[in-house]
Image: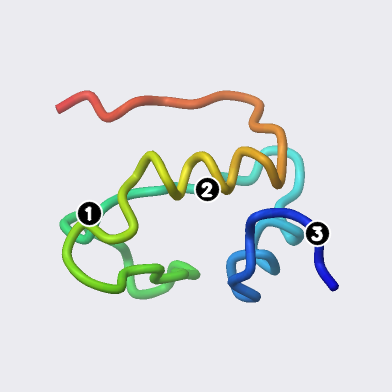
């Protein structure tokens, strides 16, 4: 059995694949994403899960070098 909060296999794989200098963007449905980008869609309904829930679960899975808040 896997320990930790993250149960989504694709999100776990994305985090495990991150290397030094790689970028992960956690955003809402309105963020423009290039078609060439690897995207893991966690949406169930509008605003579910919310950003705080997603960031909380992800923060337990890895240590970020830096975080940049939305400037808008």
Residues at discs 2 and 3 in contact (Cβ within 8 Å): no
- From the image, state whether disc 3 or disc 1 is nearer to you: 3
Label 2, label 3: how far apart the Cα atoms are: 22 Å
State the residue in front, 42 or 21: 42
Q: Is disc 2 surrounded by few (<14), some (14 to 19) or many (20+) residues within 10 Å?
A: few
- Residue 26 is left or right of residue 7, and the answer is left
Q: Earlier in the sequence, mark 2 or mark 3?
A: 3
> Residue 53, relative to residue 38: is it above or below?
above
Q: Earlier in the sequence, mark 3 or mark 1?
A: 3
Quadrant housing residue 42? bottom left
Q: Which residue is mark 3?
A: 3
* Residue at image location 32% in from the left, 49% down from the top: 27
Q: Is disc 3 surrounded by few (<14), some (14 to 19) or many (20+) residues within 10 Å?
A: few
- From the image, state whether disc 2 or disc 3 is nearer to you: 3
Q: Quadrant of the C terminus?
A: top left
* Residue at image location 27% in from the left, 30% down from the top: 70
Q: Is disc 1 surrounded by few (<14), some (14 to 19) or many (20+) residues within 10 Å?
A: few
Tag 1's secondary structure?
loop
Quadrant housing residue 34? bottom left
State the residue in front, 23 or 52: 52
Q: Where's residue 2, x and y in %? A: 81, 67
Q: Which residue is mark 2?
A: 24
> Residue 6, relative to residue 71: is it above or below?
below
Q: Where's residue 55, x and y in %? A: 48, 42
Q: Where's residue 48, x and y in %? A: 27, 61
* Residue at image location 42% in from the left, 46% down from the top: 53
Tag 3's secondary structure?
loop
> Residue 71, relative to residue 35: is it above or below?
above
Q: Which residue is mark 1?
A: 31
Quadrant housing residue 31? bottom left
Q: Quadrant of the N terminus?
A: bottom right
């Amino acid at each position: 059995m896997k320990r930790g909060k993250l149960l989504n296999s694709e999100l776990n794989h994305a985090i495990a694949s991150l290397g030094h200098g790689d970028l992960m963007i956690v955003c809402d449905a309105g963020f423009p994403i290039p078609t060439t980008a690897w995207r893991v869609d966690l949406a169930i309904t509008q605003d579910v899960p919310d950003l705080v829930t997603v960031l909380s679960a992800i923060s337990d899975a890895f240590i970020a070098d830096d975080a940049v808040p939305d400037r808008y």
